[in-house]
Amino acid sequence: MNFAGKVIIVTGASSGIGAATAVFLSKLGAKLSLTGRNVNNLTKISKQCETAANVHLIPADLTNEKDIENIINSTVKHYGQLDVLVNNAGILETGTIENTSLAQYDRLMNTNVRSIYYLTMLAVPHLLKTKGNIVNVSSVNGIRSFPGVLAYNVSKASVDQFTRCVALELALKGVRVNAVNPGVILTELQKRGGLSDEQYAAFLERTKETHALGRPGKPEEVAATIAFLASDLASNITGASVPVDGGRHAMCPR
Ligand code: NAI
């Protein structure tokens, strides 16, 4: 995989899967626009990247339309082109149909779906010029159903459907669109979503049974799959939702 000369936007690059993806892509020669809300963390991640000159930081809250517009404008102004969009940022909250709220629905859909919808709309004219591609970070929750995280499941199923539809719309124009569907990955997502330290420890312990490989995944393992899908090695793959979940998607209770 070689991304020399390629310009890549990674959202949610200040932590977890986004940070690992930024660092990995930088080692493969990419020029990066890294976006996130936490500027201190973004700066820390940029220091782990291979070449400082190839990192452009764009502070952005993806629930703010002006910030989304600035991600594209600032990238094109800085680098003159866009080759890959990695829609990674997302949030998780717990809730069932009996105790969810419309406010929760709006938070999850605005962050996990609406922001991707708008950022992709604005990125596509530039991706058409470079025959670039898009990688969306969905979840095993997009392709399988779990109780207790209702709005999150709905948001990630939307990301998978969005991936397939946009892939079909852009295929003959030379732009590929794919998704990765991680299982449990060691990041801050679940604790940010409300799990206490004890609940999180129990959640991780359960991955011995809930994931065929018997362990949670690492952000670097997702980053490697994102990089593959974004690379020319994946030139015949579009509209795919690729599990990176230790076999979680293939399991069912017995
Ligand atoms: P994380 O919490 O470390 O990273 C999420 C990133 O998204 C953070 O940098 C956060 O600041 C950013 N973000 C959230 N809301 C934002 C907003 N309004 N504006 C700008 N940035 C915002 O967690 P992780 O795990 O790295 O999450 C990345 C993606 O992976 C998410 O889409 C998540 O749903 C997905 N995922 C994670 C799994 C896991 O077990 N960690 C499993 C399946 C999917």
Image (tube, helix red, strand yellow):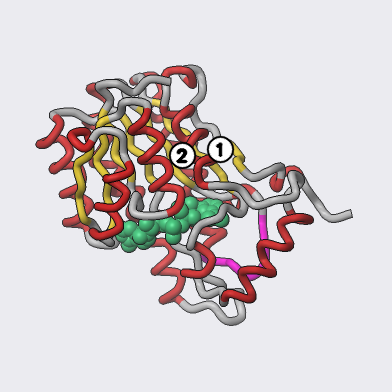
Residue 61: name its quadrant: bottom left
Give the crowd class for mark 1: few <14, some 14-19, many >=20 residues within 10 Å. many
Question: Along the line of sight, which residue is nearer the eye, 179 or 5?
Answer: 5
Boundaries of the magenta span:
145-151
Q: Are marks 1 and 2 in contact (CB under 8 Å)?
A: yes
Look at label 2 and name its amino acid.
Answer: Thr
Which residue lies at the image location 12% right of the left edge and 36% below the top edge? Answer: 78
| Above or below, 166 relative to 109 | above
Instruction: Specify whether residue 32 is painted magenta.
Output: no
Quadrant in which the N terminus appears: top left
| Above or below, 175 relative to 141 | above
Question: Along the line of sight, which residue is nearer the eye, 95 or 74?
Answer: 74
Ligand 1 visible in quadrant: bottom left
Q: Which residue is mark 2?
A: 163
Which residue lies at the image location 36% right of the left edge and 30% below the top edge? Answer: 27
Residue 64, position as x, y percentages in the image: 23, 61
Residue 165: name its quadrant: top left
Look at the numbered disc 1 and give the secondary structure of its residue: strand
Residue lying furthest bottom in this view?
99
Residue 90 in view: no
Residue 153, position as x, y percentages in the image: 56, 59
Residue 131, position as x, y percentages in the image: 31, 21
Q: Which residue is mark 1?
A: 241
Residue 249 in view: yes
| Above or below, 89 relative to 33 | below
Left or right: residue 76 versus residue 142 is left
Residue lying furthest right in this view?
254
Which residue lies at the image location 45% right of the left edge and 73% below the top edge? Answer: 104
